Image (cartoon, grey):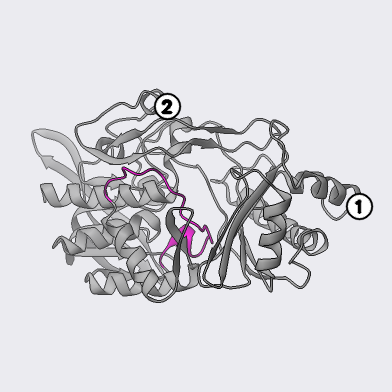
């Protein structure tokens, strides 16, 4: 049996941070990824940029190393004070390189097939995970043993398999999204036009870096704010280019190292669908791809600079904002967050707003708060002494998770778990 100090299941945002930091600290580390690429939401999900989450963040060693490596090959820019503008394709290459340089053993196309557990001692009822067996390319592999395990699968797939307790979620689900890219965009033409057309600098920003132009802008169907793009969406619905629900959420960004390409943080699927149900996820994927075609036609017809644009990439995975949340040794609450509660061993510090999407008009939440901390105990399984979680499946209530699910916090969670394991290993 192969034996490791730590095995991390899930090679996404949090999993990569945990693996890199654990291995760099001298722990023998295995990273298991069910797909063929690392990066999760940032690569397969096209979730760019990484949103800035405050000036006092902690556990950022991995993030800083990632920024440095991407910048070396033209896959990163700093825009509006945020260094998290990444190229999702170059990121795949950089993550492979970083794991290799840190001596992380990576297994692609691999999932956990089975497991065994035991007691810490005959007089102690605390349970730990002994080992796991893997399935790779549909073939059973050898058993793997480890002192510690980290579930970084996002949906808590490993924790479900080993019968962990979860925070009851009932029907509390945010709508899913499917991101996409359009290329062939005259970005300078669009940037100059939108900058003059929309004077709201909280919505529309433009920045020139040498010959490159970077921008962001947005629109939603919520009526509590004036959106400069509203007349175009209204007209598109009237003319049949879009369905009314297609315009519920629209956000676009430029992409580092991809001149002429624009990333879309949409469509947001407004049907009441459960991200833990494969039938509902399948329905969301089909619906979203239909909407992507209509949104691309909308852009070409109504937005300056998109006249010759085309869909160049559709995300390989649906964007899930919240699904399973594990029961941890501490359940973090929205009251903890809003009160800025301090903890002895914080995993992260952030000021990202409470960002909870809703499928109905005028019912989403985007509430700015002060700075807050998350304790490491919210990343520890209640059921198993040697199991941690990292990422959006953390032990937090529904509203608090809406602030903590973002990539910057997931990086810190993964790193914090790795550093904690090193301290007790």
Looking at the rendered structure, which numbered label has been put on residue 334? 2
What residue is drawn where x is 25% and y is 48%?
417
Query: Can you give x and y, in whole percent of width and height, for residue 387 in the image?
Result: 25, 46
Label 2: how many residues lie within 10 Å, few (<14), some (14-19) or many (20+)?
some
Query: Can you give x and y, in whole percent of width and height, for residue 45 in the image?
Result: 53, 60
Looking at the rendered structure, which numbered label has been put on residue 201? none
Q: Main secondary structure of the magenta part?
A: loop
> Is residue 222 part of the magenta span, yes or no?
no
Q: Nearer the viewer, mark 2 or mark 1?
A: 1
Q: Is residue 409 visible?
A: yes
Query: Can you give x and y, in whole percent of width and height, for residue 420 in the image?
Result: 18, 47
Q: Tell which circle, 2 or 1, labels the residue nearer the N-terminal end.
A: 1
In the image, is residue 96 above or below residue 250? below
Check disc 1 and report the residue beneath it. Answer: 239
What residue is drawn where x is 20% and y is 36%?
345
Give the total of numbered labels: 2
In the image, is residue 55 above or below residue 395? below
Label 1: how many residues lie within 10 Å, few (<14), some (14-19) or many (20+)?
few
Asked if residue 326 lies left or right of residue 173, the reply is: left
Q: Quadrant of the N terminus?
A: bottom left
Asked if residue 385 lies left or right of residue 412, the reply is: left
Q: Which residues are magenta?
A: 38-59
Dot 1 lies on which element? loop
Label 2 – label 1 distance at C-alpha:
43 Å
Query: Can you give x and y, in whole percent of width and height, for residue 6 in the image?
Result: 21, 57
Q: Is residue 380 visible?
A: no
């Amino acid at each position: 049996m192969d034996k490791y100090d730590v095995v991390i299941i899930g090679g996404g945002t949090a999993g990569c941070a945990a693996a890199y930091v654990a291995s760099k600290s001298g722990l023998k580390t295995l990273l298991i990824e069910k797909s063929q690429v690392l990066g999760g939401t940032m690569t397969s999900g096209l979730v760019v940029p990484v949103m800035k989450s405050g000036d006092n963040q902690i556990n950022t060693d991995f993030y800083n190393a990632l920024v440095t490596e991407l910048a070396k090959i033209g896959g990163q820019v700093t825009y509006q004070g945020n260094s998290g503008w990444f190229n999702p394709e170059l990121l795949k290459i950089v993550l492979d390189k970083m794991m290799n340089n840190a001596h992380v053993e990576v297994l692609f196309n691999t999932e956990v097939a089975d497991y065994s557990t035991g007691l810490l001692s005959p007089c102690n009822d605390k349970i730990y995970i002994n080992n796991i067996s893997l399935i790779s390319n549909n073939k059973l592999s050898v058993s793997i043993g480890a002192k510690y395990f980290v579930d970084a699968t996002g949906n808590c797939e490993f924790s479900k398999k080993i019968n962990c307790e979860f925070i009851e979620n009932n029907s509390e689900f945010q709508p899913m999204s499917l991101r996409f890219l359009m290329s062939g965009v005259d970005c300078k033409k669009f940037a100059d036009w939108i900058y003059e057309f929309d004077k709201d600098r909280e919505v529309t920003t433009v920045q020139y870096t040498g010959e490159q132009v970077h921008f962001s802008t947005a629109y939603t169907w919520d009526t509590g704010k004036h959106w400069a793009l509203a007349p175009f969406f209204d007209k598109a619905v009237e003319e049949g280019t879009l369905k009314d629900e297609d315009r519920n959420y629209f956000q676009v960004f430029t992409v580092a190292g991809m001149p002429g390409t624009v990333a879309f943080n949409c469509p947001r699927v407004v049907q009441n669908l459960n991200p833990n149900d494969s039938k509902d996820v399948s329905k969301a994927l089909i619906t979203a791809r239909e909407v992507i075609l209509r949104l691309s036609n909308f852009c070409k017809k109504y937005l300056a600079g998109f006249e010759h644009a085309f869909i160049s990439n559709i995300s390989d995975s649906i964007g899930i904002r919240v699904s399973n949340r594990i029961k941890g040794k501490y359940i973090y609450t929205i009251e903890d967050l809003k009160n800025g509660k301090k903890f002895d061993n914080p995993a992260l510090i952030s000021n990202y707003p409470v960002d909870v999407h809703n499928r109905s008009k005028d019912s989403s939440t985007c509430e700015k708060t002060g700075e807050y901390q998350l304790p490491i105990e919210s990343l520890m399984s209640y059921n198993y002494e040697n199991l941690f979680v990292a990422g959006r499946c953390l032990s937090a209530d529904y509203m608090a998770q809406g602030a903590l699910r973002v990539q910057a916090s997931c990086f810190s969670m993964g790193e914090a778990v790795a550093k904690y394991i090193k301290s007790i290993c």
